[in-house]
Image (spheres, rainbow, N blue to C red):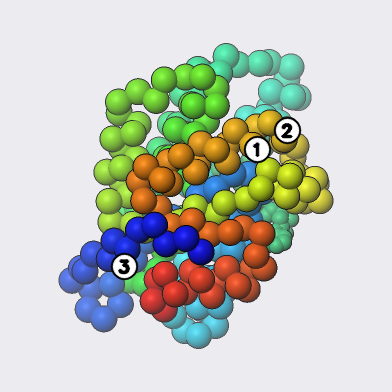
Amino acid sequence: MHAISTRPLPATSHGHDPPQTLVILGPDGAGKSTLIEALTRQLLNERIRARRLANAAARSWLTKFCRRSGITFPTFTQDFFETSIRGFNVARNMVSAAHSGGLSVMDRHLYCQLVLRRLRGHPSGLLLPWLAAKSTECARIILLDIDPHLAYERIVSRGKDHETLEYLSESRDEYLRLAQLHGWIILDASLSTSLLVEQLRLVIGK
Ligand SMILES: Nc1ncnc2c1ncn2[C@@H]1O[C@H](COP(=O)(O)OP(=O)(O)OP(=O)(O)O)[C@@H](O)[C@H]1O
Ligand SMILES: Cc1cn([C@H]2C[C@H](O)[C@@H](COP(=O)(O)O)O2)c(=O)[nH]c1=O
């Protein structure tokens, strides 16, 4: 684990179980959903309040729709569609996290759209970087870093979708660039899920 940020979680007025938000980012196949499920299950078994909140962008649905219908959207249209849906889910999940005590662990965030924009050769714009930073001000962000070959293997064995090695490699580089820029904590996704859960519990202090 490379702790490149030691920013403390902000205190709130929710008594001894204040809302805490953790955001897990990383390339496709890094193991984000698996890790969040394992962490929240373990905490709930110990009667510690925790929930997974997925900030999906419906990319999987859009890919299937395009394949079935034979329609291909320009990448700017795809970006508009995905960013709107992810933005809506982020807003909805932020409200949910703020109104629940305990830990909320978000699977993906607006930064994923910034990564996709970079990979598609689009400009980042001004609004999205600002919104991404503003909406994670009170959260702690973790990057699950993964070698693209391992991510590729995991996606193949999951058998749900397909990604190219090139996409996974560029995606990793961009996530690492953002992590250095913003001081996110980086975890090694090649470790076992149980070790990663332990590391996350150290980060959140639960
Ligand atoms: N630590 C791990 N060790 C070995 N295999 C893992 C680990 N974490 C996840 N996997 C496996 O890798 C595959 C991808 O995991 P998962 O779906 O959680 O990734 P993800 O980051 O949420 O992916 P996506 O963003 O594409 O939805 C799954 O088949 C899962 O069982
Ligand atoms: C790029 C791409 C991704 N997917 C899959 C990979 C993940 O499991 C989800 C990510 O969903 P989100 O909406 O970004 O949260 O979608 C896919 O099926 N097709 C793609 O082209």
Q: Is residue 199 left or right of residue 164?
A: left
Q: Mark 2 to mark 1: distance in Å? A: 6 Å
x 57%, y 68%: residue? 196
Of residue 125 and residue 84, the one placed in the foreground of this image is 125
Residue picked out by circle 3: 19
Residue picked out by circle 2: 164
Q: Is residue 145 left or right of residue 55?
A: right
Residue 186: where, in percent of width, then height? 49, 56
Indicate yes or no: mark 2 CB to ligand 2 under 8 Å: no
Mark 2: few, some, or many residues within 10 Å (few <14, many ≥20)? Answer: few
Residue picked out by circle 1: 168
- In front of the other: label 1 or label 3? 1
x 74%, y 17%: residue? 70
Q: Quadrant of the C terminus?
A: bottom left
Mark 1: few, some, or many residues within 10 Å (few <14, many ≥20)? Answer: many
Which quadrant of the figure shows ligand 2? top right
Of residue 147 and residue 125, the one placed in the foreground of this image is 147
Name the element at disc 3.
loop
As drawn, which residue projects farthest toward the left? 13
Residue type of the residue flagged with mark 3: Pro
Residue 138, picture quadrant: bottom left
